[in-house]
Amino acid sequence: MPGPTVLITGAAKRIGRGIALRLFKEGYSVAIHYGRSLEAARETAAACGGAPLFQANLESVPEIVRMFSEVQSRLGRLDALVNNAARFTRFDPMEITERDWDFIHSVNLKAVFFCCQQGARLMRLSGGGRIVNISSLGGIRPWADHVHYCASKAGVIMLTRALAKALAPEITVNSVAPGVIPFDDIDPSGLAMIQATPARRGGTPDEIAGAVLYFLQAGNFITGQVLAVDGGLSQR
Ligand SMILES: NC(=O)c1ccc[n+]([C@@H]2O[C@H](COP(=O)([O-])OP(=O)(O)OC[C@H]3O[C@@H](n4cnc5c(N)ncnc54)[C@H](OP(=O)(O)O)[C@@H]3O)[C@@H](O)[C@H]2O)c1
């Protein structure tokens, strides 16, 4: 029997890739969404047993609707959705323009909502499902150089909680809030945050994936929750 079908957004690289690899290892039928990273998405899909690929620019609600329609026609069902794709920029808040604001919110918040909506419509056709939204420590703690990013991720946390009520009891909606998960492009402020992390290290994609897996496997008594996977940084 194939395992539950799960779509992971932004799964070509980095954390999304780590989530896809872990869920595949745990027996899920993984579907990979990507935006621009076709080559990396192909590699991730190959590492996930030839997983199907879905492309969409998540800035566009019509593209999101088209993608979920393709998921329905190609896969026949959707049991779970992991909203991982996001943008991250640093800006002096006094210099942020409307365009900068929309650049972040179109993907980080608006797309997460409409992916939840479209995913939930499919999940309801097969009796229910699981949604996990990747938020951020920046949605819990304020960062002065990332005001718009923090606002978008706080929005993800609140939409997670409100949708948990709206979509219960068939669908659970939870969030994983990563602390610093370092890659090659980590900057001095990221390194400083790692130094301030009680665990004395950055996290790994597989540690985020483990928290995602927990919410996917939990019963419907766990919904509307936010799990910070941050080495204790949110407690400082
Ligand atoms: N890394 C960290 O330390 C950290 C900390 C806290 C929270 N997080 C959160 O964890 C998640 C993953 O983080 P990450 O660092 O691995 O993310 P990332 O590499 O910055 O972005 C993940 C993917 O999002 C996709 N994406 C962005 N804009 C898109 C658009 N308009 N349309 C379609 N796809 C789009 C990109 O896909 P393509 O490459 O295919 O275009 C990208 O590969 C994000 O939600 C992030 O906010 C990360």
Image (cartoon, rainbow, N blue to C red):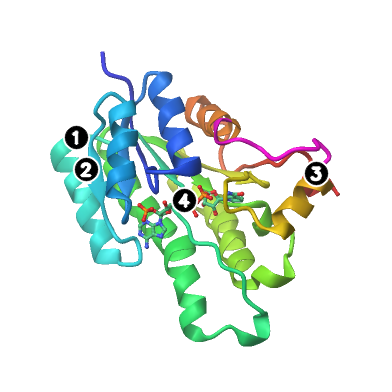
The residue to which callout 4 is attached is 166
In the rendered image, residue 195, in percent from the top left (x then y), is placed at 81, 46
Tag 2–tag 1 contact (CB < 8 Å): yes
User: Looking at the image, is mark 1 or mark 3 nearer the viewer?
Assistant: 3
Left or right of 3, for residue 177: right
Q: How many marks?
A: 4
Magenta highlight: main SS: loop
Left or right of 220, for residue 51: left
Residue at 58% over, 83% down: 96
The residue to which callout 3 is attached is 197
The residue to which callout 1 is attached is 75
| Of the image marks 4 and 1, the number of the one nearer the N terminus | 1
Which image quadrant for residue 202? top right
Which image quadrant for residue 231? top right
Tag 4–tag 3 contact (CB < 8 Å): no
Q: What is the secondary structure assignment of the residue under circle 4?
A: helix
Tag 4–tag 2 contact (CB < 8 Å): no
The residue to which callout 2 is attached is 71
203 in relation to 235, above or below: above
Q: What is the secondary structure assignment of the residue under circle 1?
A: helix
Alpha carbons under labels 1 and 3: distance apart: 41 Å
Q: For the residue marked with disc 2, what is the amino acid? A: Val
